[in-house]
Amino acid sequence: MGAQLLLGEAMGELDDPRFCGEVVRFLVAALDAVKPAFAWVGADGPATDDTNLDCVLNRRVRDSVREARNVLRGCSWTTVCPEQLSVRLGGPDALAATGAFHQVVPLSAGGVVLQATETVAEYTDNAVRDVFEALHPVLPPGMPQFDPAHPELRYFPADASRFGG
């Protein structure tokens, strides 16, 4: 199972900790009893089946979906990591210990919800880098290329398979 929730700036609450916290609580409640393959929440991606990394790595959606339990499809302000990949990253405690996340919430059925910053507005380039550093071992390989069709996409400009910190 996969899901996306795209928050628009027109909502006007992307800097409100209460609003952002409620969004994450909603996501956790919606996914807690299932084994999600991937989900994300952000204001930085296309409102399509493509993820930010699908776009900048020129990955086909069907390949990305098929490989979702082996390679994380993308990362955003809040990312849902499937259980298989969470285990490869050391589990919820190890992910929390990276310091890259405001909140790490284990899901009852498996997987974790990773909230990078308290609010969407705080998801700066530094936060994008921190999330990339924490998740790079399970991100797809390849050097991201700017996608002029989606200038709003947030990503760290490095090949995850060659990243050394």
Image (cartoon, grey):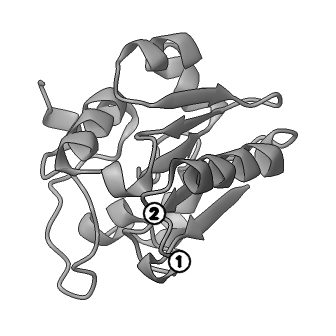
The residue at the far right in this view is: 33
Q: Position of residue 112 (x, y in %)?
A: 62, 32
* Quarter location, residue 118: top left
Judge whether 143 appears above or below 28 on screen. Answer: below
**Circle 2: residue type:** Leu
Question: Could you tell me if the residues under marks 1 and 2 are in contact, i.e. CB atoms within 8 Å?
Answer: yes
Judge whether 164 appears above or below 122 on screen. Answer: above
Any part of residue 74 in sight? no
Say few, some or many: other residues with alpha carbon within 10 Å of mark 2 (under 14 / 14 to 19 / 20 or more).
many
Which residue is pictured at 45% across the width and 31% down the height?
102
Q: Quadrant of the C terminus?
A: top left
Q: Quadrant of the N terminus?
A: bottom right
Which residue is pictured at 32% across the width and 49% down the height?
122
Q: Which residue is identified by label 1?
A: 11
Position of 141 with respect to 67 (left or right) is left
Q: Which mark is residue 14?
A: 2
State the SS at label 1.
helix
**Circle 1: residue type:** Met
State the SS at label 2.
loop
Position of 141 with respect to 119 (left or right) is left
**Between marks 1 and 2, how big is the CA–CA gap?**
7 Å
Foreground of the two, 162 or 28: 28
Say few, some or many: other residues with alpha carbon within 10 Å of mark 1 (under 14 / 14 to 19 / 20 or more).
few
Q: Position of residue 143 (x, y in %)?
A: 14, 54
